[in-house]
Amino acid sequence: MDRHGVRFARPFASTAVTGMNAAADWHAPPRQALGTGALLIGAASLQMAGAVWAVAGGLALFVAGLPHGAFSHTGRALLNRKPYVIRYLLAGLLAGLAFLWQPVAALAAFLLASAWHFTFDHSSGATLRRSAIALIAIGGSALFRPTETQAVFAALCGSAIPAPVMIVLAVCGVAGYAMTARVLLKRPRDPALWLVAVSPALFHPVLATGLVFWVGHAGPLTSRLARLRNWTPVTWLALGGAAVAATAAIILALPLAPAFLPWYAAAAVGLIAPHLLPLRWLSPAADRQGTPVQSSQAAISPAT
């Protein structure tokens, strides 16, 4: 890991891992090629089935990726630590209220914080690759599907999205693709990055962003967490079942009260935003012990 990566990884230790070791499971061929191929086929099927199915698929990927935020970079459970839970809830409440007060500004801040978080989580290889994924995550759909993306943001915020916001996001997308091209020129055999690159052009914004989130961020981290905590197939089935059930509940609830969509969005921002903060702001010191290198060594230790 480069020294700048180490420098910036520590504040984001809730998900900080070392790229080479942490992503070994996800990035090792042929597993990566098979996984990304299956995701591409599944996403294409959902896209062809219609917008509702595409949105459902994207939400399922988001929900499936959430559990990694409940653990520290050493694999310790954080939700059974009272100080962490209290601080997390307070930060989430403030983030949710900020979204209800100034939804467009809060959404922009949330997207920028997500990009920063993706860049320095050390789950997906070198810094340039992570930066490319981060910028495509927030700007890829704005670049290729601006009308659909603006409509999604407007529905979430309950108000129109100013054109300059969409332009800035599209520029982020352009920067992300420029970085992606540079990475792929050096290492073209990278199925996950290819999937990240094509998703915003092919799929509904919610589905595309869900794919980028899972492939470029949550998937590698969840894979590493599974090794640290010795997850069994039953755990994976439970995670998948919970994601499907939660997504179904959301999809069924939305038509019943569409006017409350901004409130749902505020709740989602409140749930996720604290995870983007430095762990040292939320967690007891005991959960911050160990460097990213030490944690990555634990991940490949026979004892784990």
Image (cartoon, grey):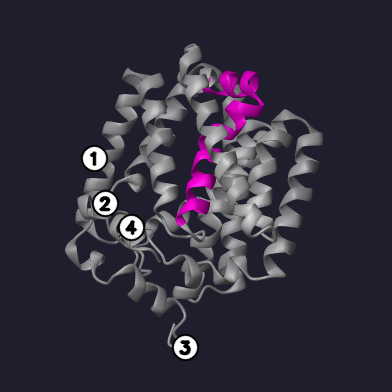
- Other residues around mark 4 within 10 Å, as few (<14) / some (14–19) / many (≥20): few
Quarter of the N terminus within the rendering:
bottom left
- Other residues around mark 2 within 10 Å, as few (<14) / some (14–19) / many (≥20): some
Determine the secondary structure under disc 3. loop
Residue 141 counted in the magenta span? yes
The stretch of residues the image draws in magenta is 127-153
Spatial separation of the CA atoms under disc 4 and disc 1: 31 Å
Q: Which residue is mark 3?
A: 302
- Label located before the other in sequence (2 or 4): 4
Answer whether labels 4 and 1 touch (C-beta < 8 Å): no
Visible residue check, residue 209: yes
Determine the secondary structure under disc 2. helix
Q: In the image shown, does 43 or 259 lie closer to the viewer? A: 43
- Label located before the other in sequence (3 or 1): 1
Q: Which residue is mark 4?
A: 4
Spatial separation of the CA atoms under disc 3 and disc 1: 39 Å
Q: Which residue is mark 1?
A: 90
Kindly identify the residue that appears in the image at 61 percent across and 66 percent down. Answer: 27
Q: Is residue 178 above or below residue 139?
A: below
Q: Amino acid at mark 2?
A: Val
Kindly identify the residue that appears in the image at 22 percent across and 48 percent down. Answer: 86
- Label located before the other in sequence (4 or 1): 4
Q: Which residue is mark 2?
A: 85
Q: Amino acid at mark 3?
A: Pro
Determine the secondary structure under disc 4. helix
